[in-house]
Image (tube, helix red, strand yellow):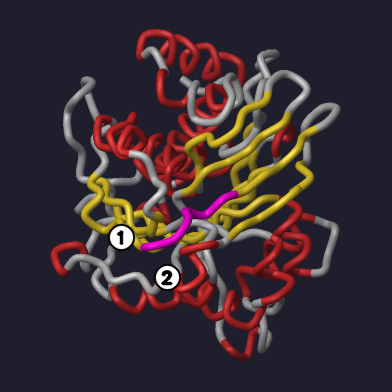
Amino acid sequence: MDMVIVGSIGYDDIQTPAASGSDLLGGAAVYSGLAASFHLRTMDEEPTKVGLVGIVGDDFSVYDQMVLEKAGLNLAGVVRAEGETFRWSGKYEGAMESVETLATEVNVLADFKPELPDVWNNPEILFCASTHPATQVAVLDQCPGAQLTVLDTFMLWIESEFETLSEAMRKVDIAVINEQEACAIADDEILPRAMKSIMSGEALHGGSGAGPGPRCLIVKRGSGGVLAMLPGGALALPAYPTDKIVDPTGCGDSFAGSLLSYLIGRQGVLNDLDAIRNALVHATVTSSFTLGGIGVTALGSIDRGIYHARVDKYRRIVGIS
Protein backbone atom coordinates (compact mmCIF):
# COMPACT_ATOMS: atom_id res chain seq x y z
CA MET A 1 0.00 0.00 0.00
CA ASP A 2 1.36 3.42 -0.97
CA MET A 3 -0.49 5.30 1.75
CA VAL A 4 -2.62 4.30 4.72
CA ILE A 5 -4.76 7.04 6.27
CA VAL A 6 -6.25 6.57 9.73
CA GLY A 7 -8.89 9.04 10.82
CA SER A 8 -12.50 10.05 11.10
CA ILE A 9 -15.17 9.37 8.49
CA GLY A 10 -18.36 11.19 9.28
CA TYR A 11 -21.11 13.65 8.54
CA ASP A 12 -20.88 17.41 8.92
CA ASP A 13 -23.41 20.19 9.37
CA ILE A 14 -21.73 23.38 8.18
CA GLN A 15 -22.71 27.05 8.18
CA THR A 16 -20.62 29.71 6.45
CA PRO A 17 -21.42 33.22 5.19
CA ALA A 18 -21.43 31.79 1.65
CA ALA A 19 -23.25 28.46 2.03
CA SER A 20 -24.65 25.90 4.41
CA GLY A 21 -25.34 22.18 4.34
CA SER A 22 -26.39 19.25 6.50
CA ASP A 23 -25.37 15.59 6.52
CA LEU A 24 -22.35 16.36 4.35
CA LEU A 25 -19.76 13.64 3.87
CA GLY A 26 -16.71 14.67 5.87
CA GLY A 27 -14.01 13.68 8.32
CA ALA A 28 -10.23 13.97 8.25
CA ALA A 29 -9.71 10.62 6.50
CA VAL A 30 -12.21 11.56 3.80
CA TYR A 31 -10.69 14.93 2.92
CA SER A 32 -7.09 13.71 3.03
CA GLY A 33 -7.96 10.52 1.15
CA LEU A 34 -9.79 12.31 -1.66
CA ALA A 35 -6.90 14.74 -2.06
CA ALA A 36 -4.27 12.01 -2.12
CA SER A 37 -6.28 9.95 -4.57
CA PHE A 38 -6.67 12.90 -6.95
CA HIS A 39 -2.91 13.29 -7.17
CA LEU A 40 -2.09 9.60 -7.42
CA ARG A 41 -4.43 8.90 -10.33
CA THR A 42 -3.59 9.88 -13.88
CA MET A 43 -7.20 9.43 -14.96
CA ASP A 44 -10.62 9.11 -13.36
CA GLU A 45 -11.83 5.64 -12.33
CA GLU A 46 -8.24 4.42 -11.88
CA PRO A 47 -7.75 2.63 -8.52
CA THR A 48 -5.05 3.84 -6.16
CA LYS A 49 -3.03 2.26 -3.40
CA VAL A 50 -4.52 4.56 -0.76
CA GLY A 51 -6.34 2.79 2.05
CA LEU A 52 -8.62 4.33 4.66
CA VAL A 53 -8.84 3.01 8.21
CA GLY A 54 -11.85 4.15 10.20
CA ILE A 55 -15.31 3.30 11.46
CA VAL A 56 -18.81 4.23 10.33
CA GLY A 57 -22.25 3.49 11.73
CA ASP A 58 -25.12 1.64 10.13
CA ASP A 59 -26.48 5.03 9.01
CA PHE A 60 -23.53 5.58 6.65
CA SER A 61 -25.06 5.67 3.19
CA VAL A 62 -24.22 3.35 0.32
CA TYR A 63 -24.00 6.43 -1.89
CA ASP A 64 -21.22 7.96 0.21
CA GLN A 65 -19.39 4.63 0.25
CA MET A 66 -19.59 4.63 -3.55
CA VAL A 67 -18.24 8.20 -3.67
CA LEU A 68 -15.11 7.09 -1.82
CA GLU A 69 -14.70 3.91 -3.85
CA LYS A 70 -15.21 5.78 -7.12
CA ALA A 71 -12.41 8.12 -6.04
CA GLY A 72 -10.12 5.08 -6.02
CA LEU A 73 -9.89 4.65 -2.25
CA ASN A 74 -9.54 1.20 -0.71
CA LEU A 75 -12.06 0.80 2.13
CA ALA A 76 -10.92 -2.61 3.38
CA GLY A 77 -9.84 -0.92 6.62
CA VAL A 78 -13.22 0.72 7.26
CA VAL A 79 -15.45 -1.04 9.80
CA ARG A 80 -19.24 -0.70 9.81
CA ALA A 81 -20.67 -0.95 13.33
CA GLU A 82 -24.08 -0.72 14.94
CA GLY A 83 -24.88 2.84 15.93
CA GLU A 84 -24.51 6.27 14.39
CA THR A 85 -21.61 7.64 12.39
CA PHE A 86 -19.38 10.39 13.83
CA ARG A 87 -20.99 13.81 13.39
CA TRP A 88 -19.65 17.35 13.63
CA SER A 89 -21.40 20.70 13.37
CA GLY A 90 -19.60 23.99 12.88
CA LYS A 91 -20.18 27.64 12.02
CA TYR A 92 -17.86 30.12 10.29
CA GLU A 93 -18.27 33.89 10.32
CA GLY A 94 -16.51 36.91 8.82
CA ALA A 95 -13.27 36.03 7.06
CA MET A 96 -13.72 32.38 8.13
CA GLU A 97 -10.27 32.16 9.70
CA SER A 98 -11.67 30.13 12.60
CA VAL A 99 -14.69 27.94 13.26
CA GLU A 100 -17.12 27.69 16.14
CA THR A 101 -17.83 24.05 16.90
CA LEU A 102 -21.54 23.77 17.66
CA ALA A 103 -21.65 20.04 18.36
CA THR A 104 -19.49 16.93 18.20
CA GLU A 105 -21.16 13.52 18.38
CA VAL A 106 -18.43 10.89 18.60
CA ASN A 107 -20.90 7.97 18.33
CA VAL A 108 -19.28 4.74 17.01
CA LEU A 109 -15.86 6.42 16.95
CA ALA A 110 -15.81 6.36 20.77
CA ASP A 111 -14.99 2.65 20.97
CA PHE A 112 -12.97 2.34 17.78
CA LYS A 113 -9.84 0.22 18.06
CA PRO A 114 -8.21 0.16 14.63
CA GLU A 115 -6.95 -3.11 13.24
CA LEU A 116 -5.15 -2.69 9.95
CA PRO A 117 -5.43 -5.41 7.31
CA ASP A 118 -2.28 -7.55 7.51
CA VAL A 119 -1.14 -6.51 4.04
CA TRP A 120 -1.29 -2.84 5.09
CA ASN A 121 1.21 -3.07 7.95
CA ASN A 122 4.15 -1.83 5.88
CA PRO A 123 2.87 1.14 3.89
CA GLU A 124 5.20 3.59 2.26
CA ILE A 125 3.42 6.41 4.11
CA LEU A 126 1.29 6.10 7.25
CA PHE A 127 -0.80 9.18 8.00
CA CYS A 128 -2.52 9.39 11.36
CA ALA A 129 -5.05 12.15 10.82
CA SER A 130 -6.43 14.20 13.69
CA THR A 131 -7.92 11.34 15.68
CA HIS A 132 -7.36 10.37 19.35
CA PRO A 133 -3.62 10.21 20.22
CA ALA A 134 -4.06 6.74 21.75
CA THR A 135 -5.40 5.56 18.39
CA GLN A 136 -2.41 7.16 16.67
CA VAL A 137 0.04 5.40 18.99
CA ALA A 138 -1.72 2.06 18.49
CA VAL A 139 -1.60 2.38 14.71
CA LEU A 140 2.03 3.49 14.69
CA ASP A 141 2.90 0.42 16.76
CA GLN A 142 1.10 -1.79 14.23
CA CYS A 143 3.18 -0.42 11.34
CA PRO A 144 6.85 -0.67 12.32
CA GLY A 145 7.77 -1.03 8.65
CA ALA A 146 6.18 2.21 7.46
CA GLN A 147 8.79 4.20 5.54
CA LEU A 148 7.39 7.61 6.49
CA THR A 149 5.09 8.30 9.46
CA VAL A 150 3.01 11.45 9.77
CA LEU A 151 0.37 12.84 12.13
CA ASP A 152 -2.03 15.72 12.53
CA THR A 153 -3.94 16.73 15.66
CA PHE A 154 -6.34 19.35 16.99
CA MET A 155 -6.85 21.46 20.07
CA LEU A 156 -9.07 18.99 21.94
CA TRP A 157 -6.21 16.46 22.15
CA ILE A 158 -3.65 19.11 23.07
CA GLU A 159 -5.85 20.19 25.97
CA SER A 160 -7.01 16.76 27.16
CA GLU A 161 -4.48 14.13 25.99
CA PHE A 162 -1.18 15.99 25.94
CA GLU A 163 0.93 13.18 27.40
CA THR A 164 -0.31 10.63 24.87
CA LEU A 165 -0.09 13.17 22.06
CA SER A 166 3.53 13.81 23.02
CA GLU A 167 4.21 10.07 22.79
CA ALA A 168 2.69 9.98 19.32
CA MET A 169 4.65 13.03 18.15
CA ARG A 170 7.90 11.41 19.25
CA LYS A 171 7.09 8.37 17.10
CA VAL A 172 6.53 10.16 13.77
CA ASP A 173 8.81 11.63 11.14
CA ILE A 174 6.53 14.54 10.24
CA ALA A 175 3.84 16.47 12.09
CA VAL A 176 1.42 18.58 10.03
CA ILE A 177 -0.48 20.92 12.36
CA ASN A 178 -1.87 24.44 12.32
CA GLU A 179 -0.41 27.59 13.85
CA GLN A 180 -2.78 27.71 16.80
CA GLU A 181 -1.94 24.11 17.67
CA ALA A 182 1.82 24.62 17.36
CA CYS A 183 1.76 27.66 19.64
CA ALA A 184 -0.48 25.86 22.14
CA ILE A 185 1.79 22.81 22.32
CA ALA A 186 4.83 24.98 22.97
CA ASP A 187 2.98 27.60 25.03
CA ASP A 188 4.75 30.17 22.88
CA GLU A 189 3.18 32.67 20.47
CA ILE A 190 6.42 33.12 18.50
CA LEU A 191 5.87 30.47 15.83
CA PRO A 192 9.47 29.71 14.72
CA ARG A 193 10.55 29.37 18.34
CA ALA A 194 7.53 27.20 19.13
CA MET A 195 8.34 24.93 16.19
CA LYS A 196 11.96 24.47 17.23
CA SER A 197 10.82 23.65 20.77
CA ILE A 198 8.44 20.97 19.49
CA MET A 199 11.06 19.40 17.23
CA SER A 200 13.65 19.27 20.01
CA GLY A 201 11.10 17.66 22.33
CA GLU A 202 11.40 20.46 24.86
CA ALA A 203 7.77 21.49 24.37
CA LEU A 204 6.42 17.95 24.65
CA HIS A 205 5.52 16.10 27.85
CA GLY A 206 8.72 15.10 29.63
CA GLY A 207 10.82 17.72 27.87
CA SER A 208 13.84 17.10 25.68
CA GLY A 209 15.09 14.48 28.13
CA ALA A 210 12.26 12.20 27.00
CA GLY A 211 13.46 12.41 23.42
CA PRO A 212 13.09 14.68 20.39
CA GLY A 213 9.86 15.39 18.59
CA PRO A 214 9.18 14.96 14.86
CA ARG A 215 12.13 15.50 12.53
CA CYS A 216 10.01 17.70 10.27
CA LEU A 217 7.27 20.09 11.35
CA ILE A 218 4.88 21.65 8.83
CA VAL A 219 2.59 24.37 10.13
CA LYS A 220 -0.53 25.39 8.23
CA ARG A 221 -1.26 29.09 8.66
CA GLY A 222 -4.54 29.50 6.76
CA SER A 223 -4.48 32.70 4.73
CA GLY A 224 -0.91 33.17 6.01
CA GLY A 225 0.37 30.21 4.00
CA VAL A 226 2.68 27.54 5.40
CA LEU A 227 5.95 27.33 7.33
CA ALA A 228 8.00 24.12 7.33
CA MET A 229 11.10 23.22 9.34
CA LEU A 230 13.28 20.29 8.34
CA PRO A 231 16.70 19.01 9.43
CA GLY A 232 18.24 20.84 6.47
CA GLY A 233 16.47 24.17 6.72
CA ALA A 234 13.14 25.97 6.58
CA LEU A 235 10.59 26.74 3.87
CA ALA A 236 7.79 29.30 3.72
CA LEU A 237 5.11 29.73 1.07
CA PRO A 238 2.07 32.02 0.86
CA ALA A 239 -1.50 30.84 0.44
CA TYR A 240 -2.90 30.79 -3.08
CA PRO A 241 -4.70 34.14 -3.58
CA THR A 242 -8.21 32.89 -4.27
CA ASP A 243 -11.30 35.07 -3.86
CA LYS A 244 -13.69 32.10 -3.93
CA ILE A 245 -13.98 31.16 -0.27
CA VAL A 246 -17.08 29.09 0.42
CA ASP A 247 -16.10 26.63 3.16
CA PRO A 248 -12.70 26.13 4.85
CA THR A 249 -13.70 22.77 6.36
CA GLY A 250 -11.20 20.07 5.47
CA CYS A 251 -8.63 22.42 3.94
CA GLY A 252 -5.96 21.28 6.38
CA ASP A 253 -6.77 17.63 5.74
CA SER A 254 -6.72 18.00 1.96
CA PHE A 255 -3.45 19.92 2.37
CA ALA A 256 -1.92 16.95 4.20
CA GLY A 257 -3.22 14.35 1.75
CA SER A 258 -1.88 16.29 -1.22
CA LEU A 259 1.46 16.94 0.44
CA LEU A 260 2.04 13.28 1.26
CA SER A 261 1.02 12.05 -2.18
CA TYR A 262 4.00 13.94 -3.61
CA LEU A 263 6.42 12.28 -1.18
CA ILE A 264 5.60 8.74 -2.31
CA GLY A 265 8.51 7.04 -4.05
CA ARG A 266 11.12 9.49 -2.79
CA GLN A 267 14.03 8.37 -0.65
CA GLY A 268 15.57 10.60 2.01
CA VAL A 269 12.75 13.09 1.60
CA LEU A 270 13.34 14.76 4.97
CA ASN A 271 16.68 16.00 3.65
CA ASP A 272 15.29 17.04 0.26
CA LEU A 273 14.13 20.65 0.43
CA ASP A 274 13.19 20.70 -3.26
CA ALA A 275 10.90 17.68 -2.88
CA ILE A 276 9.20 19.18 0.16
CA ARG A 277 8.83 22.54 -1.58
CA ASN A 278 7.18 20.90 -4.60
CA ALA A 279 4.85 18.95 -2.33
CA LEU A 280 3.93 22.15 -0.47
CA VAL A 281 3.09 23.86 -3.76
CA HIS A 282 0.58 21.14 -4.65
CA ALA A 283 -0.81 21.02 -1.11
CA THR A 284 -1.38 24.77 -1.14
CA VAL A 285 -3.10 24.79 -4.51
CA THR A 286 -5.28 21.80 -3.67
CA SER A 287 -6.46 23.52 -0.50
CA SER A 288 -7.50 26.53 -2.57
CA PHE A 289 -9.88 24.25 -4.49
CA THR A 290 -11.26 22.72 -1.28
CA LEU A 291 -12.21 26.24 -0.17
CA GLY A 292 -14.36 26.71 -3.25
CA GLY A 293 -17.33 24.53 -2.32
CA ILE A 294 -19.34 23.31 0.63
CA GLY A 295 -18.02 20.08 2.16
CA VAL A 296 -16.11 17.87 -0.28
CA THR A 297 -18.01 19.05 -3.35
CA ALA A 298 -15.21 21.16 -4.82
CA LEU A 299 -12.40 18.81 -3.79
CA GLY A 300 -14.19 15.85 -5.34
CA SER A 301 -14.73 17.53 -8.70
CA ILE A 302 -11.43 19.26 -9.54
CA ASP A 303 -10.83 19.62 -13.27
CA ARG A 304 -7.27 18.50 -13.98
CA GLY A 305 -6.66 21.12 -16.66
CA ILE A 306 -7.80 23.94 -14.38
CA TYR A 307 -5.75 22.45 -11.56
CA HIS A 308 -2.50 22.41 -13.52
CA ALA A 309 -3.13 25.94 -14.80
CA ARG A 310 -3.54 27.11 -11.21
CA VAL A 311 -0.32 25.33 -10.18
CA ASP A 312 1.54 27.07 -13.00
CA LYS A 313 0.10 30.44 -11.95
CA TYR A 314 1.06 29.85 -8.32
CA ARG A 315 4.61 28.87 -9.28
CA ARG A 316 4.95 32.15 -11.17
CA ILE A 317 3.59 34.09 -8.19
CA VAL A 318 6.14 32.59 -5.78
CA GLY A 319 9.00 32.49 -8.29
CA ILE A 320 9.40 28.71 -8.49
CA SER A 321 10.11 27.23 -11.91
Classed neighbour count for the residue bearing mark 1: other residues with Cα under 10 Å, few (<14), some (14–19), many (≥20): some
User: Residue 294: percent from the left, percent from the top?
Assistant: 59, 25
Q: Which residue is mark 1?
A: 79
- Report the Cα–Cα distance between label 2 and label 1: 9 Å
Amino acid at pointer 2: Phe
Q: What residue do we see at 65% from left, 59% from top?
A: 154
In the rendered structure, the answer to whether residue 55 lies left or right of residue 108 reads left
Res 112 label: 2
Q: Which amino acid type corresponds to the residue marked 1 in the rendered image?
A: Val
Residue 247 shown in magenta: no
User: Which portion, as a residue range, is magenta?
Assistant: 82-87
Magenta highlight on residue 86: yes
Quadrant assignment, res 180: bottom right
Q: Tell me whether circle 2 and circle 1 mark residues in contact (CB < 8 Å).
A: yes
Mark found first going from the N terminus, 2 or 1: 1
**Residue that appears at 60% across and 33% down:** 22
